[in-house]
Image (cartoon, rainbow, N blue to C red):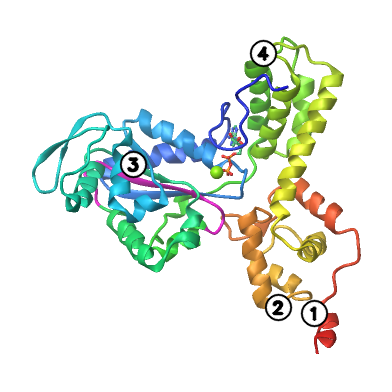
Amino acid sequence: MNHHEAIIERGPAKYFHGRISERNALKQLLQETSKKKIGSSLLIQGPPGVGKTALIEEHKKEASLQGWQVVDLTIPSLYDPKELFRRLTKNQKAHDVQTTFGVDLKIFNVGFVPKHIEETPYLNEAIIRSQPTCLVLDEAQTLELILSENHRDKVADFFRTYHNVLSEKGFVFLFGGLSPTKDVLRQFGISRFNPKAIHYLGMIGKHAEQQIIRDWLKKEIQTPSHTTFWIQQISKQTDQWPRHIQSYANALCNYLKPKEVLTNQRLKQVLDDGNDLKNIYYQQRCDHLDYEYREMIAHVVKTLPHPFVKRHFIEAFSTFLSQKESQKLYKTMLLRGILHLDQDGKSSIPIPSLKTYLIETYGAGQPPPSQAQLLPRKR
Ligand SMILES: Nc1ncnc2c1ncn2[C@@H]1O[C@H](COP(=O)(O)OP(=O)(O)O)[C@@H](O)[C@H]1O
Ligand SMILES: [Mg+2]
């Protein structure tokens, strides 16, 4: 019984709120880079569901408003000039581009293919340098996984050409990705991030959370009722976590007809449904881990003071795992969004209710056997 088309689990937000400092930082970056005629990079890093893609979409809107050409990159477009050309010209209106070899070319969005394929890289460069340009790569952590050696070199070349280049008009790389993205980009030579240019996303503010819920009730459902009580009840469950807020917004759309009056019976349905969706999200965080690992995690997070440094994490797991296994688990937990890395280099479980979920779901029994207990059996 879904009356709404607005339901989305991820990506651009219909009712975006918060992230004020991040949005101001982008505005400043755009101004500075076009004034100083330099290139810069901005990285938005954080666990799944924290709102990276939604923020990137807002950034893209802002850049477009300020007259920047905004281009979504794909991984193949980083090593294949033809693919990059397609991306660059996808939304281009016909306009003149002065190429590096002094020829004026008209770029058309439909069906224009350079006559000589060798010209493509020069054309790409010409298009990028013809206007202030923002190149966007979301999910940038995947660079690590899918590249063959041959492609790796080409991607590194690409970044070398454009990262921190002097650009007549201004140039920005906008990256989004999970916590290890900064390290992944370093492997490709992008290491000189200005500390202000990495945004570690965590929970959004209480006020923004309430505004989002209010918009779903008032603008989407268009309920005639007072919304204060509902906002209060829902925000008790959402932990200032964008993905959770979206889950309850989806529940609202599932259970309320347009312009419906708010009743207690409906509230219960919405809270139950939202809660189910929240638990599914938590299950998904764990579904790549063996059960025994989940038990270890539950027992460790019960006692480990938050936030913690990586070394404490490794030490805490040393009862159960070898150092190498603990290192691997740490990375997996970052990638799955069970851990969040903040700007001080400290880690924590990103959402309070995720910690509770882990402890209640996997921490009830005895702790799993320690290495010391296992070793004699192995021998
Ligand atoms: N600041 C925000 N305001 C409103 N909705 C948001 C905000 N941030 C994220 N969302 C919504 O939360 C959900 C998860 O966000 P998403 O950007 O997909 O997360 P990520 O890319 O970090 O995995 C999406 O449905 C998105 O629209
Ligand atoms: Mg995303």
What's the CA distance linking mark 2 and mark 1?
A: 8 Å
Amino acid under label 1?
Gln
Residue 247 in the magenta stretch? The answer is: no
Could you give the CA–CA distance between mark 1 and mark 3, rounded to whole angstroms? 52 Å
State the separation of the CA atoms marked 3 and 4: 39 Å
Labels 1 and 3 touching (C-beta < 8 A):
no
How far apart, in angstroms, are the residues tagged by discs 2 and 4? 56 Å
Res 222 label: 4
Q: Which of marks 3 and 4 is nearer the N terminus?
A: 3
User: Which residue is disc 2 drawn over?
Assistant: 322
> Residue 261 location, x and y as percent?
77, 11
User: In screen coordinates, is 35 left or right of 139?
Assistant: left
**Local SS, label 2:** loop
Which portion, as a residue range, is magenta?
A: 166-180
Give the residue at mark 1: 371
Q: Which of marks 3 and 4 is in front?
A: 3
